[in-house]
Image (cartoon, helix red, strand yellow):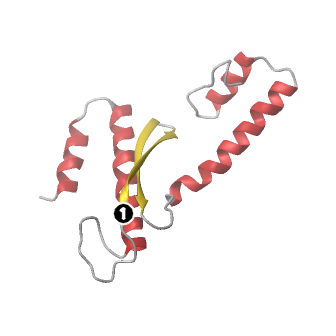
Amino acid sequence: MTDDMIAFRRLLEKSADADLLREMIGFAAERLMELEVGQITGAAYGEKNPERLVQRNGYRERDWETRAGTVELRIPKLRKGSYFPFFLEPRRLAEKALTAVIQEAYIQGVSTRSVDDLVRAMGMSGISKSQV
């Protein structure tokens, strides 16, 4: 049995549905990132390959807000160049759009409580008064 299958079995043994979904999203995201980085570097994690293009250089932590909740990602870093997962790209645009909506609501005099409700309606975990 492969390590992936063992990890997947552990996920299925969890009881809470939201936790399970969040864990499964994280599991899939990690596998997608490993495949992408393997293509960029020319070798899978731990693989010795004379045709390797670049080496890995640890990980950076990033929280990913999903509808299932916050997923903690470990994004691989490279020694030369950079790597950013393809599935996070649209998120940058969404964050910019959300920031613009919050700014406009503040300028128009919308209360911070209403802005928090708006953010929650858009699927995020909310926003504090000081963040507005």
User: Where's residue 12, x and y in %?
Assistant: 24, 41
Instruction: Judge the density around disc 1: few (<14), some (14-19), many (≥20) Cα neighbours within 10 Å.
Output: some
Left or right: 113 with respect to 6?
A: right
In which quadrant of the rendered image does the N terminus lie?
bottom left
User: Where's residue 44, x and y in %?
Assistant: 29, 69
Image point (83%, 32%), residue name: 104
Residue type of the residue flagged with mark 1: Arg
Q: Residue furthest right?
A: 108
**Toward the viewer: 86 or 22?**
86
Dot 1 falls on a residue whose secondary structure is: strand
Left or right: 89 with respect to 76?
A: right
Q: Would you name the residue on which mark 1 appears?
A: 56
Q: How many marks?
A: 1
Image point (52%, 56%), residue name: 87
Image point (78%, 17%), residue name: 111
Using the rendered view, name the quadrant where residue 33 is placed.
bottom left
Left or right: 3 with respect to 119?
A: left
